[in-house]
Amino acid sequence: MSDNNTFNLVGDIGATNARLSLVPLNSSDLTSIKKLPCNDFETFQDAISFYLSSFPEAKIHSA
């Protein structure tokens, strides 16, 4: 049985923007897509932390 709050974190990281999304386990549907300007963050980890702060209940299975 899968947990409805468990996701894979996927992204497309470019020079200008990082696009991040959550994908529920056993699904290929992108959800909660956000485009973040890379210049707004000192590190990639900062961008991921900012993105995930919008989803405090989400459990990340893999990235």
Image: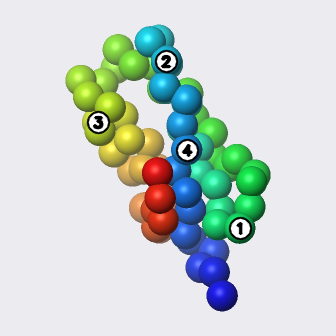
> What amino acid is labelled 1 in the image?
Asn
Occupied quadrant, residue 23: bottom right
> What amino acid is labelled 4 in the image?
Val
Pick whichever of labels 1 and 3 is earlier in the sequence.
Answer: 1
Disc 4 is placed on an element classified as strand
Q: CA distance from mark 1 to mark 3?
A: 28 Å
Q: How is the image coloured?
A: rainbow
Which residue in the structure is indicated by mark 2?
14
Q: CA distance from mark 4 to mark 3?
A: 15 Å
Which class describes the residues within 10 Å of circle 1: few (<14), some (14-19), or many (20+)? few
Rendering coords of residue 19 (x, y %) = 55, 30
Residue in the image at 29% along x and 38% along y? 45
Which class describes the residues within 10 Å of circle 4: few (<14), some (14-19), or many (20+)? some
Which class describes the residues within 10 Å of circle 3: few (<14), some (14-19), or many (20+)? few
Q: CA distance from mark 4 to mark 2?
A: 13 Å
Above or below residue 60? Residue 53 is above
Above or below residue 21? Residue 24 is below
Which residue in the structure is indicated by mark 1?
26
* CB contact under 8 Å: marks 1 and 4: no
Rendering coords of residue 40 (x, y %) = 34, 20
> What amino acid is labelled 3 in the image?
Asp
Horizontal arrangement in the rendering, residue 32 relative to residue 44 (left or right) = right
- Label 1 or label 3, whichever lies nearer to me, is 1
Residue in the image at 52% along x and 50% along y? 9
Q: CA distance from mark 1 to mark 4?
A: 14 Å
Q: Which mark is residue 10?
A: 4
Which residue in the structure is indicated by mark 3?
46
Occupied quadrant, residue 24: bottom right
Disc 1 is placed on an element classified as loop
